[in-house]
Image (cartoon, grey):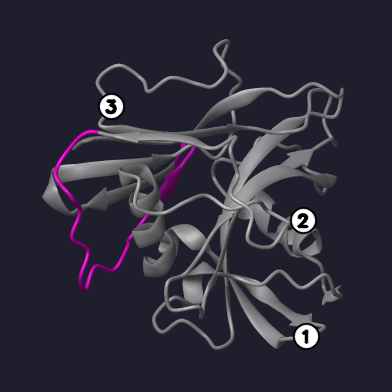
Amino acid sequence: MAIIHHTTLKPTKLELLTDWLPSRPWYHGGSGAPVLTKSGGFRLDDPEGEVGIEFMVATDTSTTEPTAYLVPLTYRGAPLDGAEHALIGTMEHGVLGKRWVYDGCHDPVLVAELLSLMEGRARAQAQSINDTPDPEVVHSYSGAPFTLDGFTPEPADDAEGTRLLLPHGTVLHVHRVLAPVPENPPLRPEGALGHVARGWQAPDGSRPAALFMTLRTA
């Protein structure tokens, strides 16, 4: 079980993302810096207890219509070998010291636990409360069990989000720009092998919900 420390972070997660988000091809903001608020998300536990795993919804209110982005993050106590290109930045944690913050789509620990969540072997955890499952996260999967031993994710970003080609001929789509759907909780899309969905807190006080990830055949 991950322990959530309510302590200082320098810089904060949102400060790191303010510099990083505009560099992404799926960023919808203008030429100015985004104005971000943390709007929700959930966590997963690393079975080894070494890597922090968070799926954050960060809403940019700098434009006329606020945009909610899904940002999978991992927090490590040492650099992840071969993932220099995926480093968002470093921060000083008031309890744990220096932490390396990565775009989690490049981190094999996050990918493995995300697929475990889809399969029902891992439980989504509340974002800011210790040892508390998150009942808002919905997920599904219909297929053979995943085996990811030795798998190194090589995600590709485009204007639509992030795609990861997985073993067994499947593709994981991470929906970076969240598009609210009418049904709540969101249903698995037709033809998809699996999905993860959740709601978040919009600036107007509403709680839209969207697909966070979908899994399809390649």
Q: In this rendering, does residue 57 appear at all?
A: no
As helix, strand or loop, the secondary structure at mark 1 comes to: loop
Q: What mark, if any, has residue 95 been given in the picture?
A: 1
Residue 196 lies, in percent from the top left, at: 45, 36
Residue 212 lies, in percent from the top left, at: 50, 36
The image quadrant of residue 137 is top right
Residue 80 lies, in percent from the top left, at: 46, 81
Q: Earlier in the sequence, mark 3 or mark 2?
A: 2
State the CA–CA distance, disc 3 to disc 2.
33 Å
* Three-letter amino acid code of the residue under disc 2: Thr
97 in magenta: no
Observer-nearest residue: 125 or 79? 125
Give the quadrant of the N terminus: bottom right
Residue position for label 2: 18
Q: In this rendering, does residue 29 appear at all?
A: yes
Q: Is residue 150 above or below residue 57?
A: below
Observer-nearest residue: 198 or 108? 198
* Three-letter amino acid code of the residue under disc 3: Ala
- Lateral position of residue 145 relative to residue 92, left or right: left
At x 17% / y 38%, what residue is drawn? 143
At x 68% / y 22%, what residue is drawn? 208
Residue position for label 3: 192
- Lateral position of residue 12 relative to residue 86, left or right: right
Mark 3 is surrounded, within 10 Å at the Cα level, by few (under 14), some (14 to 19) or many (20 or more) other residues, namely some
Closest to the camera, between mark 3 and mark 2, is: 3
